[in-house]
Amino acid sequence: SEQSEEVDEWSTPSAASESAVEQAARVAGLDSNLQDTDMPGVEVAPKILSQEPRIYLFEDLFSPMECDFLINLVSGRLKPAGVVLQTKDKHTVQTQSRNNEQIWITPAEEESIPLLRHILRRMHRVARIPDTDAEALQIGRYESSQKYESHLDTDPGHDVERPATLLAYLSDVESGGD
């Protein structure tokens, strides 16, 4: 008899359908069938903001079309963001410290969508972290008055080990960031 496997909604979200990927590419003005060799790489030099802790700024790491592609890829799939807590249910929604929406991109999507693979490879190159050592891509959206308060981004005691974090802004805003 087959055992049903419990699914963690934070680590295995529903994947985008093939038509959703094609639509996201079309809206962004990109061809979703491009192969990695067809896509030019945008390599940018970092501006060093700090060496201790190590903080680098990569201006325009993604093209506007790539940003639009990522935004449209997750459109309609975002859910309330979870946080890692010191409880048995460590990935849980709680709105006191974080109240935005987010999604984890599935490994199947990362492997099967050429444009997404291309973007991820660039992220790994600039972060100098092999893709085999990275967790899934997380895309979040913050509306006016939403937040994620100051926190540690690594917590080995709770199975969250991140040697580096890469933040990318997919859109510009007039103000904010208090």
Image (cartoon, rainbow, N blue to C red):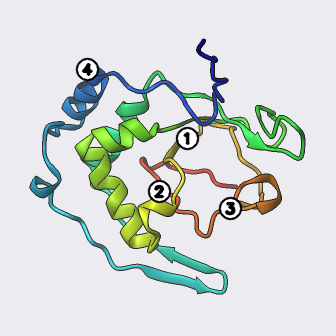
Q: Residues within 10 Å of mark 3 (few under 14, many from 20)?
A: few
Q: Quadrant of residue 162?
A: bottom right
What is the quadrant of the C terminus in the image? bottom right
Pointer 3 residue = 161
Q: Is residue 56 left or right of residue 84?
A: left
Eye-nearest disc, 4 or 2 = 4
Quarter holding the N terminus?
Answer: top right
Where residue 75 sits, quadrant-wise, is top left
* Residue closer to the observer: 89 or 54: 89
Q: Amino acid at mark 4?
A: Ser
- The amino acid beneath tag 1 is Gly
Real-space Cα separation, disc 4 to disc 2, in angstroms: 25 Å
Residue sitting at x 50%, y 76%: 56
In the image, farthest residue toward the left: 38
Which residue position is annotated with label 2?
168
Lower position in the chain sequence, tag 1 or tag 4? 4
